[in-house]
Image (cartoon, helix red, strand yellow):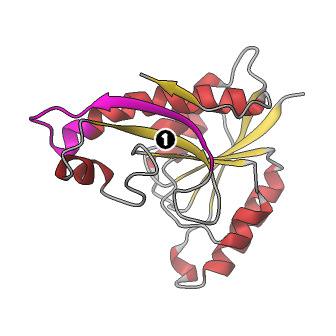
Amino acid sequence: MSLRVAILISGSGSNMVALARSMQGDHPARPCLVLSNRPDAGGLARASEMGIPTAVVDHRPFGANRAAFEGALQEALAAARPDLIALAGFMRILGPDFVGAHAGRMLNIHPSLLPKYRGLDTHARAIAAGDSEAGCTVHEVTPALDDGPILGQARVPVLPEDTPETLAARVLPMEHRLYPLVLRRVAMGDKTPITLP
């Protein structure tokens, strides 16, 4: 019996597509839902084209009431009965109650070599700091922002001529390699961290 994976997105869903494409053949998991907080997220159409059920819980009507938004998220997820949740460009901070309800079963990918550069503008911050390398991290989600046990990292060099945009363009393909590898391992019960050069 395959594990069920819900993938949460806010945008184009490129990491979602990489994850969904990887969950075939002898993979121990299958996508059961792609959920977005934005009705206009491009990834919703891509998920539908792949035959994956989709749902939207628009955060905007909830205003500052994060608990109500997360309650609606929980309802949508409960209907899909996921074993694992993969955040793939989901641009909402989740509170401790929501995270606690899925402790040990929720993954996130972040575009920096954590613990460096939690939050936004990671590539610009790496360049401004004069870092020689940047990359991405898959980690288990805990209540602290971009924290939690590191499950995998991929590294790329920072070039002298890099801009945040060119660096992001080189990191993204590594995200698409790393996240499926980590998801497969976690679905098999292995949380040993992996590193891609």
Please tell me how many numbered marks the rendered image carries.
Answer: 1
**143 shown above or below 171:** below
Quarter that holds the C terminus: top left
Relative to 79, residue 30 above or below = above
Q: Position of residue 18 (x, y in %)?
A: 53, 29
Kindly identify the amino acid type of the residue bearing the numbered disc 1.
Thr
Residue 144 painted magenta: no
The question of residue 152 being in magenta is answered with yes
Q: Residue at x 21, y 51 (%)?
A: 129
Q: Which residues are magenta?
A: 149-167
Q: Quadrant of the N terminus?
A: top right
Which residue lies under the disc numbered 1?
A: 137
Report the front residue among 14 and 49: 14
Task: Please state which of residues 132 and 9 is positioned toward the viewer in this rendering.
Answer: 132
Determine whether, in the image, residue 104 is placed left or right of residue 162.
Answer: right
Q: Is residue 78 above or below residue 106?
A: below
Residue 97 pos. (x, y %): 73, 72
Left or right: 166 with respect to 31? left
**Quarter-wise, where is residue 156 in the image?**
top left
Q: Which residue is found at the position 30% from the left and 56% from the top?
A: 121
Q: Residue at x 49, y 55 (%)?
A: 10
Position of residue 15 in the picture relative to residue 73 (left or right) = left
* Residue 56 visible: yes
Mark 1, secondary structure of its residue: strand
List x then y, in percent, for residue 169. 28, 35
In the image, 80 versus 3, the foreground residue is 3
Q: Count neighbours of disc 1 (C-alpha within 10 A) and say few if under 14, some if 14 to 19, many if 20 or more.
A: many
In this view of the protein, can residue 50 be seen by the observer? Answer: no
- Where residue 89 sits in the image (x, y, percent)? 48, 50
Identify which residue is drawn at 60% across, 84% down: 65
